[in-house]
Amino acid sequence: MHKKAAVTGGKPVFEKPLPFASPTLPSFDDVKDDIRNIFESGRVTKGQYLKEYEDAVSEYLGVPALGVSSGTSGLYMLLKALELKGEVIVPSFSFMATFHALEHNGLTPVFVDCDRDTFTIDPREAEKAITTETSAIMGVNIFGNPPDIDALETIAQQNNLRFIIDSAHSFGTLYRGKPMGTYGDGEVFSTSVTKLVATGEGGIVTTKHREVYDFVRMFREYGNSGDYDCEVPGINGRLSELHALIGLKTIPRLPELARKRNRIAEIYKNNLKNIPGINFQKIRENCTSSYKDFAVLIDRERFGLNRNQVSAALEAEGVYTKKYFDPPGHRLKYYREKYADRIKPLPNTEYIAENILNLPIYSHMTEKQAEKVTEAIARIYECRDEIINLEVTMIK
Ligand SMILES: Cc1ncc(COP(=O)(O)O)c(C=O)c1O
């Protein structure tokens, strides 16, 4: 006789709910002298810590890096710097900020399908979507899994297009042994609270082009290059000293944080692989994911419950989950209405969005916690027949 699932009246696997994400911050002891320095000097922005942070990131990656106020503002400024026009090819399976950055630049997002295994943009679909209006292809790292950079770069070069990468999830990812941040015409990391480097809010723009670097640097400062006589209407896209300090103290730990998340992912995969109807995101060959997120696809036929039912049953067990990115870009209200006449069905994107479930993961999550999450999923699977009859889980 199996144990009862919490949703059917059993005892929850987690008495105290497990958060979905949690930032791994430097210890207070590690930052207290610097915080005192910031407070006593009154230099809370535009000071030494941003410079040191940018230098540390740049040294780690081997390309120039700029600290900015968020991943979204970084994408906005990078696109602006590249002076793009017309259409930009983008995977619909991404977070809304990817598309907003295009919209705010007056660019038309051309949504294309993703690969069913890696969840990243399908290069063949990207190539098919090229028109005379296309100015760039935007790849996106999905949950830390990089897109097929080699294929996308070749397509961009052959068609005289710019190639940009939304690497919001991939500070800590290695593409063929080399860190993300070093590819294409430019990349943008996010360092918001769910990321490996979690500065609270923040982003990093990286580019090998000197003129792009100079533009973003000037643009994040209202477009003021120093003489107050601005040439472009920039924004305040700066990162404060306190945010930069957290980043500076986290950078040396980045490989270790990625390793820890990879260990959690390994436990999830090992313990869940024999449960029918659970499929994993395939990490690209010769790459190491940052595992900003860990995702499974729930096959309703084989598991016996759909994704929403599993999510509700997990919540009762004290396990919070997410459904990233449902709805995907081409189904978000703003985009589906604005581009109604050009949006086509994207079968892989739609399948993944409808069946995806992101499990909790963070760098200081314990192996025991990961084991217990898998225990909760196994219990839900065993109790699937009882659960399916519950009204509470029938939410669509
Ligand atoms: C794929 C993607 N792009 C861009 C962003 C925006 O980053 P931020 O929240 O730092 O603005 C996010 C946010 O996590 C994201 O998931």
Image (spheres, rainbow, N blue to C red):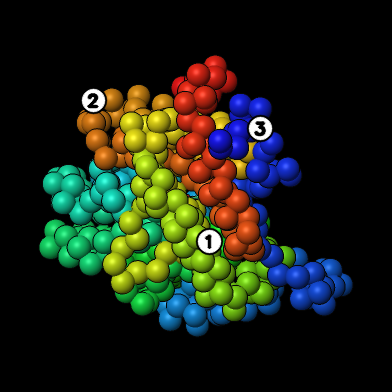
Which residue is at a point 33% across and 56% down the rendered structure image?
Answer: 282
Q: Which label sits on residue 341?
A: 2
Given residues 58 and 192, the one toward you in this image is 192
Disc nearest the viewer among 1 and 3: 3
Q: Measure how far apart labels 1 and 2 are at the Cα level.
A: 43 Å
Which three-letter amino acid code belongs to the residue tagged 3? Gly
Amino acid type assigned to the residue bearing label 2 in the image:
Asp
Q: Position of residue 19 (x, y in %)?
A: 65, 47
Q: Is mark 2 on a helix, strand or loop?
A: loop
Whichever of callouts 1 and 2 sits on the residue coming sooner in the sequence is: 1
- What is the tally of numbered marks visible in this picture? 3
Residue at the location (37% across, 42% down)? 276
- Residue 276, placed above or below residue 226: above
> What crowding class fits label 2: few (fewer than 14 Cα within 10 Å), some (14-19), or many (20 or more)?
few
* Type of the residue with mark 1: Ile
- Residue 342: % across, % down: 22, 30
Indicate which disc residue 264 carries: 1
Q: Is mark 1 on a helix, strand or loop?
A: helix
Residue 231 position in % (x across, y down): 46, 58
Q: Give the residue number, with chain letter if any, for mark 3.
A: 10
Q: Is mark 3 on a helix, strand or loop?
A: loop
Mark nearer the N terminus (3 vs 2): 3
- Extreme-front residue of the structure: 1
Comparing 42 with 3, the one in front is 3
